[in-house]
Image (tube, rainbow, N blue to C red):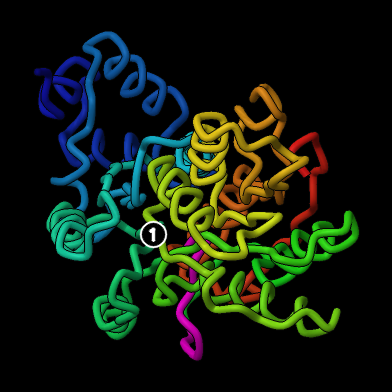
Amino acid sequence: MPTLEDVARLAGVSRATASRILSADDQSRIPFAQDTRERVRQAAIMLDYKPNRQARGLVSARTHIVGLLIPGMGESFSSSIVTVAQRELAALGYGVLLANTDSDNVMEQASIDEFLSWRVDGLLILPTQNTGDAEKLWLLWHKGIPFVLIDRLFAETPFYSVTTDDYSGAVMAVEHLLSVGRRRIAFATRPATVSTNRLRRAGYIDTLARHGVAFDPELVLNVPPSSEGGRIAVRELMQLSSPPDALFCCTDLVAVGAMEECMALDIRIPEDLALVGYSDLDFCRVLRSPLTTVHQPPALMAQCAARMLAQLMKGETPEVAQVKLPVSLVVRESA
């Protein structure tokens, strides 16, 4: 691997001069002639020199690396976040290290510790929220480490975040089901420690109440956020003495599992069971019964979060600390 000394020798300058020129951006004012700058940069290109970001970070206290934590790689929502955030940060001069926490609190803490050992300049975090405990984030906050939460937030904290309007999304879903004549509307959700689930549950319950529909706790099931969770929900709900005529799912993956189980049990969609998902993942429009779902804008979320983090890493204060983006209902054939 070529070193900084090799670049300096080829360019005919000192190591310190080569370092200052290569570490400066185009707008920086440095006391070197243009031809000297060009010689150093051309030498770096000829040698295919790659600066050691960790070593640079030890000197400058900045590595231009961001750590990105996501709870899973198995769906297009997270992959969209990763793709757009990485592209946006690259345009701003930052590299990205990625960690999949698999929705595990211990793995999340280990990943944060690992990123900090690499002296990352900041963190983008899709938090697990399995425990609802924000202690690890408070430690980052008090240490002054820039971080931005994506999709989920912790109530009554000053943490910077970019989320969508989960309460309104649930209201849209339930109001649509009520508008097509459904009254026994079930909800397949996850534990309330996760802010998205808590807000969607509140929207579900409040909307039923506004329309004079009694809340039935039997119709609310906590299931895994996967297709298997949807299959479990349908099996359990159809065993009730009075089964539901609609099912609102916390994610599109759960809705897909519910659809598969309905096919296995000869339950017609939407005639016997209307089905609504959440997120509007890419596959929703090509299912056997194209899925009615609440659309979230993951690309815009990632873009906003990356730009907010870039401001924080520069020592700037974003105008809005908690950004909440709007959602919309996409009506298809399942409801």
Residue located farthest toward the top when viewing the structure as drawn: 46
Above or below for 97 versus 151: above
Q: Is residue 197 left or right of residue 108?
A: right
Q: Could you tell me which residue is drawn at 38 percent across and 35 percent down?
A: 74
- Residue 148 shows up from this direction: no
Asked whether 75 or 191 is in front, the reply is 191
Q: How many marks?
A: 1
Above or below for 53 versus 245: above
Prevailing secondary structure class for the magenta stretch in the rendered image = loop
Percent coordinates x, y for residue 47 in the rendering: 21, 12
Based on the picture, tell me whether residue 156 belongs to the magenta stretch.
Answer: yes
Q: Could you tell me which residue is drawn at 70 percent across and 37 percent down?
A: 269
Tell me the kind of residue under disc 1: Ile
Q: What is the crowding at mark 1: few (fewer than 14 residues within 10 Å), some, or many (at least 20)? A: many
Percent coordinates x, y for residue 263 in the rendering: 56, 30
Based on the picture, tell me whether residue 198 belongs to the magenta stretch.
Answer: no
Q: Could you tell me which residue is drawn at 72 percent across and 47 percent down?
A: 274
SS state under label 1: strand
Asked whether 151 or 241 is in front, the reply is 241
Q: Which residue is mark 1?
A: 125
Q: Could you tell me which residue is drawn at 49 percent across and 85 percent down?
A: 158
Q: Quadrant of the N terminus?
A: top left
Q: Which residues are magenta?
A: 149-158
Percent coordinates x, y for residue 287 in the rendering: 64, 25
